[in-house]
Amino acid sequence: MIPKRQFILTKKNLDGDYKEMGEYKLYLGLEEEYILAKSIGIEIHLIGNIYDWEKPYFSNEDILYNIFWELFYPSDIIYRFNHYCGEYVVIIRWIGGIYIFNDAAAQKEIYYDTEFNCFASQPILIDSENYQENFYNSQKFIKKSYFILDETHRKNVKHLLPNHYIYNNKVKRFYPNKPNLITDSDSAAGKANNMIKGYLEAMSLRHNIAIAVTGGFDTRILFLASKDLDCQYYIHQIPEIKNNDIDVRIARKLTGIYNKKLDIIPYKIQDKTQDIDGIDFPRYLNPGVGLDKDVVMINGNISEVARNRIGYYRNLSGIDLAFLSGYDIEYPATIYSRWLLNKPLFDTLNYNYLDMLYWEDRMTNWAAKFKTEMAFFGRTVLSPFNSRELLEVLLGTKRSLRDFYDTKLYKIMISKLCENKPEIINLSFNPTIKRKFILIAKQLRLFRIFKYINLKLRITPEF
């Protein structure tokens, strides 16, 4: 039986109902969203949900047939999906075979065997006993419990990275495919706000949505962009986490300015979850404690892609990246070194390689794993930032405006969303001692020196 909200596309015969796709069969778990759209000689199979910021009232079916109306060839259809937000897997079937790809940050996961006989939402669902040892038995991996780039703990099972599709037993990069021109921050902020508001509206028209309000940049944008919608606002009060009281105070002030109700929900961090049969390396979870079962959680994940989380290093090696991600052994360094072969393409098309790494590694593994685990427990989590077109807008601004600790672009977005209300603009962001120290070090032009020394001396991993 296929686990809840998961899928398998395989050449084998399994128990249960399936959708036939030539030599493949698609098996879906309980509660998995699915829709098929057909035109002459071509089919689009959608697993999951997709949202249109310009036409928020469009359903999944409306969007798919709108794509058919405008385009026909599979390669054109793939690029058309850049416009949308959501967590989804797309299978395009036509006379030449099948194309398989997923959402902008691969939050709806796809794993595949290297013979291309089976595709699934988790490695555990693909028949394989060809395990890799050493690294995947190490305490450092067990503590993190998420993969690196396209590698898994099984030698013949890979993880499809975002910006790639599978066709005719090959994996091909399709994005970026054109230069990303630098735009002014005011124009970028305006368009990004309109897109986020549109995506949120589309989500609210299909689901009961809830947004966590904290002291961070992302949640402030989501709150202000959703303030005209029917939405629940909440914050988890977690005694074990430092600065949570500050977050609660900021959340109260922010929601109070707009007379919005804030639900403050007590929460205790759970132990690691060990009873998930359909998930590889399960971690601890917060499956929406205190929220109604039918509520869809909205968070700011994927936004980190446009916030220079790794920093401003120019020419890091695979070994450097392995250290910064928390590992000091050869295996991860080899994986990162292989991925760095993409750097000349990114340089040519004006995409910073560290932005792209955070997109294609951390978001694809750490953030996506969280969504998969939550789905297993019946909780849907959506990220309005999970749109290739939106990320393109944000990444089209100067990196100096997108600093992780002082994101000036997001401050401009917030100013526009609140119509320059002083009480909003003057509300602090994550007022921790660490952030204050870092901002002072940046003003003194010392922070990048500290980071460089830290990397060279291998003191503390950072991302």
Image (spheres, rainbow, N blue to C red):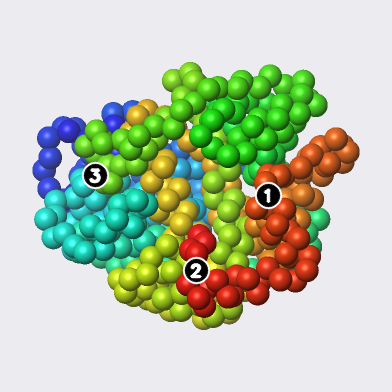
Q: Residue 459 has which mark?
A: 2
Quarter location, residue 139: bottom left
Q: Amino acid at mark 2?
A: Ile
Q: Marks 3 and 1, how far apart in space? A: 47 Å
Q: Amino acid at mark 3?
A: Ile
Residue 128 drawn above or below residue 312:
above
Between discs 1 and 2, the one toward the N terminus = 1
Q: Marks 3 and 2, how far apart in space? A: 43 Å
Q: Residue at x 88, y 38 (%)?
A: 422
Which x, y percent locates residue 192? 69, 49
Q: From the image, state whether disc 3 or disc 1 is nearer to you.
A: 1
Residue 440 drawn above or below residue 277:
below
Q: Residue 433 has which mark?
A: 1
Q: Nearer the viewer, residue 113 or 361?
A: 361
Which x, y percent locates residue 136? 25, 59
Which x, y percent locates residue 132? 19, 62
